[in-house]
Structures are given as C-alpha cells and as structure tokens.
Image (spheres, rainbow, N blue to C red):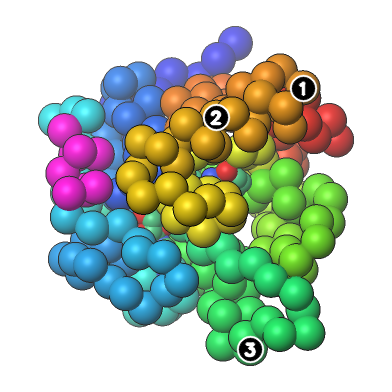
Amino acid sequence: MTLSIAGKTALVTGGARGIGAGIAGTLAKAGASVMIGDIGVGNDGDESWRYQLADAADLERTLAQGDNIRATALDVTNADACAAAVRETLDAFGSLDILINNAGVVDSGPVEHFDEDAWDRIFAVNSKGLFLMTRAALPALREGTNPCIVNTASIAGKKGYPNMSAYCGSKFAAIGITQSLAAELAPENIRVNAICPGMVGTAMWLDHLLPSNATSTEQREEEFTAAMQTTIPLGRPQTAEDMGDAVLYLVSAPNVSGVSLAVAGGFEMN
Ligand code: NAD
C-alpha cells in the first residue's frame, strides 16, 4: 500500500531553489499543496554567506512549477520565524501533513583555519534548524493526515571527508536527529526519514565546492558533470528531481521510518 499525496500540504524549507525546488515540484505534481519557506524570499541578493543564497529569480522559477506552490520568508535558525511559517502554511492551505527540513549551507576548509562563525552557522541551519522547525510544526502535523517528516541529510552524514568537519558533523547530527525523532514519534504514527543526496549540481557545488576557474555557470556545470563521471560509480551526478522522487517514496511509504536513504549513484552504500 502507498499513501496518496493528493490533497496533502507540505512545507519545504530551503525550497526556493536547488534540491528543495526539486522536492517542491515533485510533491506539487503528485497533487500536494506546497509552501516553500526560504531565507531568500523577500531577501534578494543576500551576501551574508560564502556564496549567494536563493534570490528572486530562483524563487520565480520554482513557483512556476505549479499553481499549488507558494512561498514565505523563513530563517530556520529563528524559532519565531519557524512558528510563523507554520502559521502561514495553515492560513494558506488549512493543514500541514508533510514537513521537509531541507534548508542547508556548506563551507569547507582545513579545521585549523576554519572560521568559528561559519562553524556555528552551519550547525545552526543544518542541525538546530531541524529541531526548531520540527518543534514548531508538530502541533499542526498531529492534526494532519498520515503526517511525516523528511530531513535532507547527506552522504556527508554517513562518512567523513577532509576539510568538511563542520558540514559532516552537522549532517551526522541530522541523521541522529532523524533516528531519534523516528523512535520518539512512532507511537503517534508520525514517520521521520531522511534523504542523503550524493552530488547534485546546485550552488553548493557550482559556487563553492567545485575547484574551478570557469567564468560562466554553463562552464562550471560541464566541469562538474565531467568530474562526477569519474567520481560516481554510475558515472553521472544526481539531480534535484532524483531527490524529489526519493522524498515522494518516503512520504508515501506507510511502514518506513528512521531510514536515511542515500541517493548517490553508488558512491555511498550505507
Ligand atoms: P542550495 O544552496 O541551492 O539550496 C539551499 C537553500 O536553502 C537555498 O534556497 C537557501 O536560500 C536556503 N537557505 C539557506 N539558509 C537558510 C536558512 N537559514 N533558512 C531557510 N532557508 C535557508 O543547495 P542544495 O544543494 O539545494 O541544498 C539543499 C540541501 O541538500 C541542503 O541541506 C544540503 O546540505 C543538502 N545536500 C546537498 C548536496 C548537493 O550535492 N548539492 C548533497 C548532499 C546534501
């Protein structure tokens, strides 16, 4: 048996672009109403991070995926903002059945020179954000239909990589939070799972992780794809749509909880 998505309501954090936009589009096409909560909504050209976060053009492309997608400003590190995003979702659609904790940031570098504020922000968004958003959403989820939560963790939450201690630490935490909440909320029939994306050519890779002197996005995308041909066993990067499909499975599967599903072309098998 699979659970129908039609008529349900989802809140997708970090959904203005990238993987979150892929998840929002997939859920909307499956018949859900989707509220995107993103720091980039109404905050065009935010320069406060290592690379630019979502902007108005990103959001416009994402909203164009369906009539049943809306957006609200949200910083997942702020408890009041998390509560407000839940209220906005209930006001717009009348219920909240699916919470997708997807917002995330990355920075990398040798631990010896790693910036303390960057370390704190990575954990604030990637780990504490799951707590703040889940706590804010739970009362509404309890009133929802077959409620569930999917967190976007990472293959970096299953294995450590050099120069990635902050990001990997925050994603190991995301998997631990997923498992703990799955156990805690199972008696209420609230399922909690995670996806662990492999390598998706979003801003995280194209604007930060990929070593490149390329001057255009197209060139960087080509370099990324070429690099992934030799890195990933299946010989290709993953897509935001792959992540949407994985989320759709987890949201639809009534007896799956506590899983952290790698979608990584065979790069991570645990
Ligand atoms: P992205 O930068 O394109 O998307 C991240 C989104 O989160 C942006 O829209 C950004 O504006 C938003 N955001 C950042 N800080 C926020 C905050 N405090 N509150 C609300 N929104 C915030 O990158 P992406 O690759 O799409 O990342 C999405 C998720 O996938 C992240 O959790 C990331 O860690 C994870 N992930 C990505 C990859 C990959 O290869 N791209 C691999 C594994 C995991």
Q: Amino acid at mark 1?
A: Pro
Residue 22: % across, % down: 39, 33
Is 203 magenta? The answer is no
Q: Is residue 134 visible?
A: no
Q: Residues within 10 Å of mark 3 (few under 14, many from 20)?
A: few
Q: Is residue 231 visible?
A: yes
Q: Earlier in the sequence, mark 1 or mark 3?
A: 3
Which residue is depicted at the point 81% across and 61% down?
162
Q: Which residue carries the number 2 mark?
A: 225
In the image, the segment drawn in magenta is 57-64
Q: Which residue carries the number 3 mark?
A: 116
Viewport quadrant of the C terminus: top right
Q: Secondary structure at mark 1?
A: loop
Residue 88 position by quadrant: bottom left
Q: CA distance from mark 2 to mark 1?
A: 13 Å
Task: Tell me: residue 84, above or below residue 161.
Answer: below
- The secondary structure making up most of the magenta span is helix
- Mark 2 or mark 3, whichever is nearer to me: 2
Q: Residues within 10 Å of mark 2 (few under 14, many from 20)?
A: some
Is 63 magenta? The answer is yes
- Of all residues, the one furthest to the top in this rendering is 1
**In front of the other: 43 or 258:** 43
Viewport quadrant of the N terminus: top right
Which residue is depicted at the point 83% across and 56% down?
160
What mark, if any, has residue 233 been given in the picture?
A: 1
